[in-house]
Image (cartoon, rainbow, N blue to C red):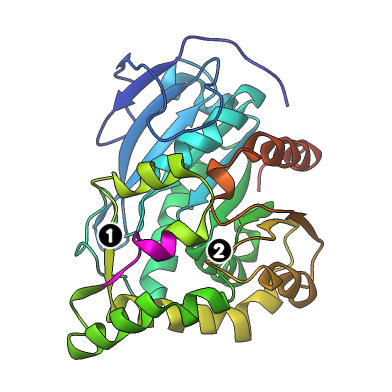
Amino acid sequence: MRWRRSPWRHGLSSSSSDSSTSFTGPRYSLCRAPAVMYLESTTIPARDGTPLACHVALPDDAGSAVAAAADAAVLVLHGIAWHGRPYRDVFAAHLVDDGVAVYAMDLRGHGLSGGTRGVLAPRAVNLDDIGAVVAHIRGRHPGARLFLAAESMGAIYALSFLARDPGAAAGLILVAPGVFLSAAQLLDPHGVVDLARALRRPSAPAVDIVGPRMGRAVRGDAFLRLRRGDALAFSHLSLRYLLGLAAANAAMLWRDAGRVAAPTLVVQGTADRAVCPLGARWLARAMPGTVEVRMLPGVAHDVLWDVETAAVFAVVRGWLRARAAGPGV
């Protein structure tokens, strides 16, 4: 992959336009600031016409004029109750200088996407939505190899999507994949109280996900301030949301993971108290393709917003370089 230099600019549009204004920096990145990039937010129509928000970083300031020249493209799927822009910012901070175009979508019902806010769409709908964004990226970057990246909850949908469409991506990057919930989460007394409340009103946002349990699941105060202060994120979820996620995870565990042969990099902290670190090892055994697992001693669930994040992306960059050569997927 080649390196580029250009001014860092930002655009906001309802399509892939090039309108831009000056932008001071990544609101959601706690890591190093990138030297250069072009940023935009756009909407992509789903199969049923629902607008899907997608946050984009391109390896130049010329916007779509250089989009086709990207060496690789990465589509990032966000974690539970959040949205794509924080992930766009942190992935772009480390990858755009290598000629990688970064896309991070808001799942339906999350962030700036259409749908009912706080409601997790059915698994099949989410997979169709991911397919719509993948088709958009392929059309915009016909010569680039496309990779999927996902954190926590996003890993469930990334794996199921590639099981359904094996040729959709040249590889997969999973960060703290939400394969198994940690025992600490299951036994947390606050969670028991929330569950009792949610059982009485299963459609109401009764389960607190940013309170004490989140504080124990991560190790960075800066990340907690970032996540808790994000107006586009959800602080509470309904039991129906969580049951829908559990059903999607069951389908991934029992059927989909064993059908994903794409080269995969799994990055997992050993001190993660949100998801069980053993899930990374389980994936390495369950998936038929080449799976490289990097366990990070002492790192918690906030892998992408940690003091070790730069080292994590050094691994990611090397992994991408080894696989980005050749024709697009």
Q: Position of residue 140 (x, y in %)?
A: 48, 36
Is residue 272 in the magenta section?
A: no
Kindly tell me whether residue 181 is visible in this rendering.
Answer: no
Q: Nearer the viewer, mark 1 or mark 2?
A: 1
Q: Which image quarter: residue 210? A: bottom left
Q: Which image quarter: residue 234?
A: bottom left
| Vertical placement of residue 61 versus 170, above or below | above
- The residue labelled by disc 1 is 235
Q: Earlier in the sequence, mark 1 or mark 2?
A: 2
* Number of other residues with Cα within 10 Å of mark 2, as a class: few under 14, some 14 to 19, many 20 or more: many
Compared across the picture, whether 110 is left or right of 85 comes to: left
Q: Which residues are magenta?
A: 207-214
Q: Out of 75 and 308, give the one closest to the viewer.
A: 308
Give the residue displayed 73% in from the left and 35% down from the top.
Answer: 314
Q: Nearer the viewer, residue 167 or 36?
A: 36
> Which percent across, then down, holds residue 266?
70, 57
How far, Cα to Cα, is label 1 from label 2?
21 Å
Q: Residue at label 2?
A: 155
Circle 1 sits in a helix, a strand or a loop, which is it? loop
